Image: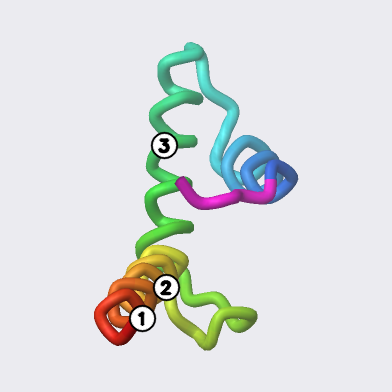
Amino acid sequence: MHALPVNGIKTEVINFLGPWKTVGQVEWETLKWVNWYNTERLHSAIGYVTPQEAEEAFYENLNNLDKVA
């Protein structure tokens, strides 16, 4: 699970895309935003890759270090 800025969810999902009539609608739109944030949005702080790609590279590097050691 990736860390997400709560204020980003509020600003980008609830304020911009809402309002919704049901809790289910809010949950669905929030899940879609979290998926986009982790799998599609490029982050400058981690080399213009997605959090998912950065996490995969991190664990791949750990695996490679284990093989060398």
**Colouring scheme applied when the structure was drawn:** rainbow
Q: What residue is drawn where x is 30% and y is 86%?
A: 68
Q: Nearer the viewer, mark 2 or mark 3?
A: 2
Estimate how packed mark 3 is, as few (under 14), some (14 to 19) or many (20 or more) residues with alpha carbons within 10 Å: some
The residue lying at 64 percent from left, 80 percent from top is 45
On the picture, is 36 further left or further right than 60? right
Report the amino acid beneath label 2: Phe
Going by the picture, which residue comes out furthest to the top? 22
Q: Which residue is mark 3?
A: 31
Residue 58: mark = 2
Q: CA distance from mark 2 to mark 3?
A: 24 Å
Which of the two marks, 2 or 1, is nearer to us in this view? Answer: 1
Q: Quadrant of residue 14?
A: top right
Position of 13 compared to 66: left or right? right
Q: Is 26 one of the magenta-colored residues?
A: no
Magenta extent = 1-5
* Marks 2 and 1, how far apart at CA: 11 Å
Identified by mark 3, the residue type is: Leu
Q: Secondary structure at mark 1?
A: helix
- Going from N to C along the chain, the mark reached first, 2 or 1, is 2
At x 38% / y 43%, what residue is drawn? 32
Q: Name the one closer to the observer, 18 or 48.
A: 48
Q: Position of residue 41 (x, y in %)?
A: 46, 69
Residue 51 placement (x, y as % from top left): 46, 66
Is 7 left, or right, of 25 in this rendering?
Answer: right
Q: Which residue is rendered at x = 55% and y = 41% of the image? A: 17
Q: Residue furthest right?
A: 7
